[in-house]
Image: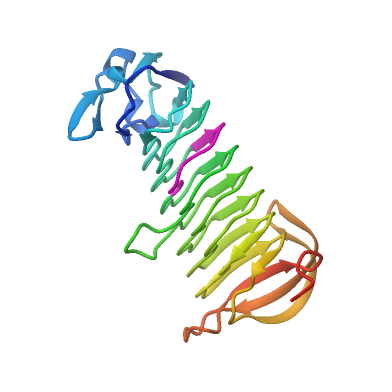
Amino acid sequence: MADVILKPIGNFDLSVEAEVVTPDNFAGKTADEIGKVLVWQGPAEYPLIDFFTVEGNGGSSAEDTTIIIDGDIPRVKRIGQQMTAGKILIKGSAGMHVGSAMEGGEIIVEGDADSWVGMEMTGGSIHIKGNTKDHLGCAYRGSWKGMSGGRITVDGDAVSQVGGGLSGGEIIIAGSVKHFCGIRINGGLIVVKGNAFRTVGAEMTGGTIVIGGCIERFTPGFEMTDVESDLKFNDIECLGDYMKFTGDYAIPQKGKGTLYVSCDNNECL
């Protein structure tokens, strides 16, 4: 496995569009060639070397290439976009669209990440060790075809529109979320270990959502069917007792999803 190390040095007053920073694009290139790869900042393109020092050569293939970004890059967008293999490790915070449309490989962000992480991803894994913002694993604006494969893990909190339009894959959030978690999902799995504010599972027609904390404002259109204990989805365990609901019956589609809600943290339901 070959390591390419990028250290941020440039002027990031304007956001940098860096979708070229993937193992697919770095494979087979020398450090000098990687430094000449062009990225957008505002209306112009600049070589990557204007923003990062580059150490190490790419591997013989994407699968054999690891990119290590050694520092915070909150103003750098689209790291790992459409990557198919290999690994990216960000030793700090990251900007918007980390792993958007990702097909394979692994991304780890040791800090926080901005919105649109894993947008419409189809495979691979993303691990955010801090918090993230809106639209995690979601469909892009104007579309309802969201994440369809792979796994996203967040050790902290997310905000709103988590997994919008999800049709496959898994999203696991150790913290809490806010509005419209799982809106219009038709497949896949969303697990939130913490709390959710409102509109969980609105207009869902398939898939599974688990809320381990409290839902402050429960979504109309769900019908309780059972109580189940110690849920397990592959290697994902949700211990405790859960009320099982189906819905959303507020929309006419025949397909319905499953919503599990912690009994202990939602005694008012």
Q: Nearer the viewer, residue 70 or 81?
A: 70
Q: Is residue 109 one of those drawn in magenta?
A: yes
The residue shown at (38%, 23%) is 60
Where the C terminus falls, by quadrant? bottom right
Q: Quadrant of residue 12?
A: top left
Main SS class of the magenta portion in the image? loop
Q: Where residue 206 appears, x then y in whole percent?
A: 54, 72
In the image, 229: left or right of 137? right
The residue furthest left is 44
Image point 32% across, 36% down: which residue? 19
The image position of residue 105, as x and y in percent, is 48, 38
Q: Which residue is depicted at the point 76% across and 69% down?
A: 266
Q: Is residue 88 above or below residue 206?
A: above
Q: State the residue at coordinates (39%, 65%).
A: 144
Q: Which residues are magenta?
A: 106-118
For residue 246, which quarter of the picture?
bottom right
